[in-house]
Image (cartoon, rainbow, N blue to C red):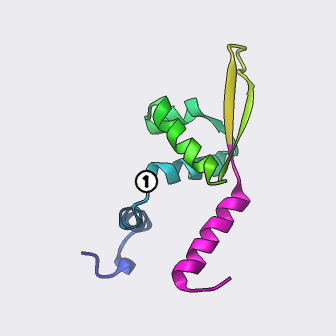
């Protein structure tokens, strides 16, 4: 049992938060990475997180349905067919997190 979070590192607090709130850590890490990179493909996410294509697409679809990601369809740079690039909606992510924090702390926006 953790008595005081003041003694814990940020990484430990994040991990504890994931467990306490039932959050899928990889989904937040995918969003975090896309926010940092600006745009990426499922193949890059598969390599980064060691997930299958279906695993990555499951997370991308959930984040897109929530309004946190946008997809852009293009031709693969090698001309070998279509490719989808994913980008984050930083404004929606900010609104969602701010609203959740306000709700949790009892602030009525």
Q: Is residue 25 above or below residue 48?
A: below
Does residue 84 appear to the left or right of 104 in the view shown? right
| Res 2 quadrant in image | bottom left
**Residue at image point 37% right, 78% down:** 5
| Res 79 quadrant in image | top right
- Residue 108, position in %: x, y? 64, 85
In magenta stretch: residue 88 = yes
- Residue 83, position in %: x, y? 67, 26
Does residue 38 appear to the left or right of 23 in the view shown? right
Question: Which residue is most to the front?
Answer: 65
Question: Which residue is most to the left?
Answer: 1
The crowding category of the residue bearing disc 1, from other C-alpha atoms within 10 Å (few below 14, some 14 to 19, many at least 20), is: few
**Residue at image point 65% right, 37% down:** 40
| Res 106 quadrant in image | bottom right
Which secondary structure class fits the magenta region best? helix
- Residue 53, position in %: x, y? 50, 30
Question: 97 or 58, which lies in front?
Answer: 58
Span of residues in magenta = 87-109
Question: 67 or 87, which lies in front?
Answer: 67
Quarter in which the N terminus is drawn: bottom left
Q: Which SS class for mark 1?
A: loop
**Residue at image point 68% right, 82% down:** 109
**Residue at image point 52% right, 79% down:** 104
Question: 37 or 65, which lies in front?
Answer: 65
Q: Is residue 53 above or below residue 96?
A: above
- Residue 92, position in %: x, y? 69, 60
Q: Mark 1 points at which residue?
A: 24
In the rendered picture of this protein, how many numbered marks are placed on residues? 1
């Amino acid at each position: 049992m953790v008595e005081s979070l003041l003694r814990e590192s940020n990484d430990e607090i994040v991990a504890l938060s994931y467990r306490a709130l039932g959050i899928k850590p990889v989904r937040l890490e995918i969003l975090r990475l896309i926010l940092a990179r600006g745009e990426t493909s499922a193949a890059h996410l598969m390599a980064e997180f060691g997930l299958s294509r279906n695993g990555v697409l499951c997370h991308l679809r959930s984040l897109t349905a929530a309004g946190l990601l946008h997809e852009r369809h293009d031709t693969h740079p090698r001309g070998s067919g279509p490719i989808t690039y994913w980008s984050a909606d930083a404004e929606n992510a900010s609104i969602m997190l701010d609203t959740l924090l306000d709700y949790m702390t009892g602030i009525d926006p």
